Image (cartoon, rainbow, N blue to C red):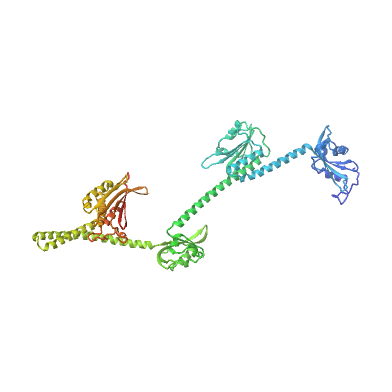
Amino acid sequence: MIKPLRIPSLPLLNRRQPSLADLGALIDLLPQPALLWDKPAGHFLLANARATELTAFTRAELTALDPDMLFEPAYPAAASQLSPGSRLANLPLRQGGSVEVIATHIGLDPQKSWFLVTLEPVSTHQQQRAEQQRQAARLEELTHLAGCATAHSTGQAVQLALAACHRLTGAGLLAVYLARPNQPSLVRAYTFNMSPTSAETEVFPEQIPAAEVPQLLQATPWAPGKRAATELQRAARAAKLAYLASAPLGAEEAVVGLLISADPGGLLREDHLPLLRIVAATITGLIEQESLRSNLVDNETEALRAARFNAVVWGASQDGILTLTRELGVVDLNPAAEEILGYATREVLDQPVGDVLIGPDNLIPALQAALQGIPTPNLGDVRLHRRDGTAFPARIRMLPLIVGDNLEGVIVLLRDLSEHEQFQVRNQQLEQRALLGEITAIFAHEVRNPINNISTGLQVLALNLPQDDPNQDLITRLNQDCNRLTHLMQSVLSFSRPAEARPEPVELAVIIPALVDRWRPRLARLNVRQEVKNSAHNTTILGDLRNLEQVFNNLIGNAVEAMSSSGGNLSIQVRPGPTVGAREHVEVNIIDDGPGIPEDIRVRIFEPFFTTNRNGTGLGLAIAKRIVTAHKGNIQVSSVPGGTVFQVQFPLIQANE
């Protein structure tokens, strides 16, 4: 029976004085070897079970040990590295020898009379320190792993994650296999090798068949001596690797790849698979982040493209577009709407649409219907008023502006029909002119025969009258009028019913000098000097020779007529014309130094029946313009006092014509 012993008052025990049995029960609960030391008495009072396990001594034998061996440091140099209250000591063992321990004494009372002495083997301490350092290093690597997402690119981030995986698991060979679109297998995307020059560089195959992926997702790693069931495991066996482990990338039901780890000689650590899964989750996040970023970039690009497209449509649309709020206030107008209505957007911003679109009574009901989600494809042809008060015909459409499931406002599409009305009027005029042309052609045809009869009768009368008869002058004037009417009727028929063209290759550099040669006698008689210049290397066009001669004869005749009073210079220049689209042209300029053509006459010079020559029909230039247009060409005139230029352009013939 243990004799009760009075002990100093302990702060932890203030209700009653504990017995040695109570204290023995307490120190037996400690996880490390421990002794209770009575400093004034100079000996140990108690030893716990852990101390007996460490030394194989009984409790009584332990309490009989000399305390000095635990409080006098055996290695003074090393003792300075311990925490305060700790000493290095050699604790004897029953079987002989000793164990190096760290003895730490802790005071239990204010008077420092009683001490709890804990004993920790140095080897255990070192193991704990090593484990602590390993845990600290692991935490640091996990921190680095979490920071991989800040890398400049996904490839760099994955490589950093693989390097961290090597430091965490000790695996010298790592690879990431990813699924690719339209490929049934996983493709090797990233690798890590501690010995890039060694033969292990080519251990991992380029692809893993999809059928082998489920086997690689099993939790048990492959090791030598196990059956190699997959191509990857067979490659590991051939390379004599110490192990091969894998972890999935992505969720179990949606695997997007695999993380493979191996090493030619290292041991598979106990925490290898959990750490491998952590790295796999990190790499999965990096890949998903890249996919999300790529999708965001694609969406942003598509949104930017759509915005640019909408901006182009908004600005280039010939229809006016008004955007309204749910309260029917004006938000925006496109340029066409500004031009049609005469308002700038800033002037009508937030104004009621009724103050901008002024006109039809059914406008507001249609807008109210649009706010209910009911579009009005056509409000009908109505008349609106511009800012200056002028009315114009318009066609209006109302469309609800719905974003998702929410109605955000109303779109009003506005088309100005003024040009349409003008086109209808112009079309009616053209129809009337066409009808008038038909009537004129019929009239000219019918009148020409009576004129011929009158002319024949006048010629007979002239033959039956003496040459000195006073009526001979009258008959001559009447004959001249008949000839003039016949020429006029012929011009009218040519204008209203042009002869059918017979297109063929025509060399302008040949026909124009030939025409000038025909005019040479008359030009000499009128003291008109002529000049023909050709600077074009190609002057072949597709045209009707007779019609083209008519055009140039008419233009030369007009130039000669302008210079007939005092003579002058006629210059005809053939030169390369402009390129329209992919079609090259040739240009012919007929230049005279006559008095010129006044502006009021020049703007009407190609109109039918417009002439300043009392003996002319007014159809020559109109017919010339029609012929040039039929040849897909262009004719225009420019004039100043002292000269006139008629410019004619024709497209050159192409190889397929």
Q: Nearer the viewer, residue 635 or 179?
A: 635
Q: Is residue 222 left or right of residue 2?
A: left
Q: Nearer the viewer, residue 228 or 273?
A: 273
Query: Is residue 522 at all visible to an observer of this figure?
Result: yes
Q: Position of residue 495 (x, y in %)?
A: 25, 57
Q: Position of residue 126 (x, y in %)?
A: 76, 38
Instruction: Name the image quarter holding residue 159.
Output: top right
Query: Is residue 251 at all visible to an observer of this figure?
Result: no
Total marks in image: 0
- Quarter holding the C terminus is top left
Q: Which residue shows up at 85% across the image and 50% down it?
A: 11
| Placement of 482 over or under 128, stated as above or below | below
Q: Is residue 223 left or right of residue 187?
A: right
Q: Is residue 111 left or right of residue 491?
A: right
- Quarter holding the N terminus is top right
Q: Position of residue 66 (x, y in %)?
A: 88, 37
Q: Position of residue 370 (x, y in %)?
A: 48, 63
Q: Nearer the viewer, residue 548 or 120?
A: 548
Q: Which residue shows up at 55% across the image and 49% down it?
A: 296
| Placement of 249 over or under 197, stated as above or below | below
| Placement of 57 over or under 440, stated as above or below | above
Instruction: Name the image quarter holding residue 113.
Output: top right
